[in-house]
Image: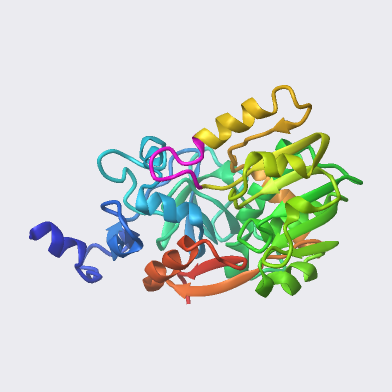
Amino acid sequence: MQAADEMNAPLRPVTAGSEGRTMRAVVHRRYGTPDVLTLGEVERPVPGDDDVLVRVHAAGASVGDYHVITGKPYLIRLSPFGGVPRPRHPVPGAAMAGVVESVGAKVTTFRAGDEVFGQAAHGAFAEYVVVPAGSIAPKPSNLSFEEAAAVPWGATALQGLRDAGGLVAGQRVLIHGASGGVGTWAVQIAKALGAEVTAVCGARSVEMVRSLGADEVIDYSKQDFTALAARFDVMFDMVGNRSLSDCRRVLRPGGVYVPCSGGGGDWVGPIFRIIGGMLSTLFSGQRFKTFVMTPNQKDLLTLKELVEAGKAKPVIERRHALGEVVEALRHVGEGHSRGQTVIRIVG
């Protein structure tokens, strides 16, 4: 009974003498639907020598955060983002933008007052977060904090297309799931790389995706993209609901299939699909390339350059207050987001 009461406890006011040492945060004590989260007060983190303490102005809520909260697929509990039998990290959240509060003894690239954005391993759904100095970059000058908090998702699209897919100017790319949090970035980044882009999305998102620069947009409710006569150099798949043979059918000889989706059930997620994909392309001449997005300052600076040059922009569908994280994560967990969902923490 005591544990249940603690989970549902309201925000505790700061007590005398504790000011400056605590902060408001979304607290994750056990796995389950987003309803298990509570808004509470925790100790403010302290940066290490190579770290930066950021006053978070806005954070992004993604389907990845949803998987961390639910602990599904269960394999995530064995990863650095999870924990057994309960979450290892009490405060979730990764993508964020804010202002540097203080820096570690060895940090020379940032100082207090700098406006930054980037991706933490965890802890962004709070007033303060500690991140390695190499995982943040100066905020794009033409974006608000809320807009900047949506930019780190672009790193997934950038690494998937450029690094895993090897996409270069003049090639043709098929982006499946082009209206989601990563998909909207993928369309713009593929165009910035000089590719010809065919995007697949639902009917309500066709015009939005076309406005991002896609050369052709396919409404999956009206047309089966696997029946296209065209063949592509790269397929970037954020959905994962078609068989590997279907996906290979749209690739030219030597083409690359890059999965960037979940699915596969509650236990091991897409592991069997990944293994099957690797085996299926062994003798086909086509390639199956997986990747794990690695936050780094170089790619954040690339995204900043694209945004400031007007070649890419965040597409924000919803904005929520910190106390509305449950609603935000419930929405992204449904898998039908159009662009990004951000959490407003300051203001």
Please tell me whether residue 195 is drawn above or below residue 214 in the rendered image: above
Kindly give the residue lying farthest to the bottom in the view shown.
347
Whole-percent x, y for residue 63 in the image:
50, 56
Q: How many marks?
A: 0
Kindly give the residue lying farthest to the right in the view shown.
170
Confirm whether residue 214 shows in the render: no
Kindly give the residue lying farthest to the top in the view shown.
283
Q: Is residue 17 left or right of residue 91?
A: left
Dividing the picture into quarters, in which one does residue 187 lie?
A: bottom right
Residue visible at 73% across and 22% down in the picture: 283
The N terminus - image quarter: bottom left
Please tell me whether residue 153 is drawn above or below residue 204 in the rendered image: above
345 and 2: which is toward the camera: 2
Whole-percent x, y for residue 61 in the image:
49, 61
Q: How is the image coloured?
A: rainbow
Whole-percent x, y for residue 247 in the image:
70, 43
Magenta residue span: 263-271
Whole-percent x, y for residue 86 in the image:
26, 44
Residue visible at 51% across and 40% down in the picture: 270
Magenta portion: prevailing SS class = loop
Residue visible at 41% across and 41% down in the picture: 76
Magenta residue check for 4: no
Dividing the picture into quarters, in which one does residue 47 lie?
A: top left
